[in-house]
Amino acid sequence: MKTIAYIVATALAVMMADTTEAATKAAAFLKTVEGFRSTAYSDAAGNRTIGYGFTSASWVGKKRVSEGEASVELSRICRRISAMLRAELGGQTLTVAEEAALISFIYNVGWGNFKSSTMCRLLKEGKRGAVVADEFTRWVYVTKGGRKVVCDGLKSRRKKERRQFMGC
């Protein structure tokens, strides 16, 4: 007879394997859209950023970061977002491409913004396809001088995320 610990460990291993596949794909995608910088800089919205778009004080306070340590952190963040996304959607099934696109999106806009978004509501309702994918293109603004302005870099990124979500 299998113990509860064995069953839980097996379930977690299966969940982590799935999470790792989408998270790995998301990390590879994020490396292309974020790019790597070993020293801090200001992004399009004026936020201090380092590595692969890290904005937390513990990272931007560093003078330099190696690509290796930034890759490890990016993978960790993507796995965490994947687990949070799965929990939020309560058992709804996503393809690897859908999940990877959503991880990239959440990485960029933040968990709170995603949770309160129409995109999240649609996903929780079980919607998929273009109705959800079209939501990516709404998130192309940065705040500069107290005003929302369209950012060409975000327009390009959202098109790529949309394509990825649709499996193209």
Image (cartoon, rainbow, N blue to C red):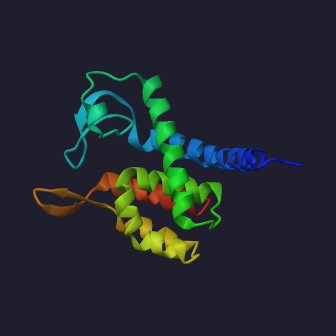
Rendered-image quadrant of the C terminus = bottom right
Residue 135 vs 102, above or below: the answer is below
Q: Depth check: 51 or 111 in front?
A: 111
Residue 81 vs 159, above or below: the answer is above
Image coordinates for residue 105, horizontal then vertical, percent: 43, 56
Q: Residue furthest right?
A: 1
Q: Depth check: 41 or 87 in front?
A: 87
The image quadrant of residue 48 is top left
Image coordinates for residue 144, horizontal then vertical, percent: 15, 55
Residue at 57 percent across and 45 percent down: it is 23
Q: Is residue 49 left or right of residue 138?
A: left
Residue at 35 percent across and 40 percent down: it is 53
Image coordinates for residue 60, horizontal then vertical, percent: 26, 32
Q: Can residue 8 be seen from the camera position used here?
A: yes
Residue at 43 percent across and 29 percent down: it is 70
Residue at 50 percent across and 57 percent down: it is 102
Q: Can residue 29 be seen from the camera position used here?
A: no
Image coordinates for residue 113, horizontal then vertical, percent: 35, 62
Q: Is residue 61 left or right of residue 37?
A: left
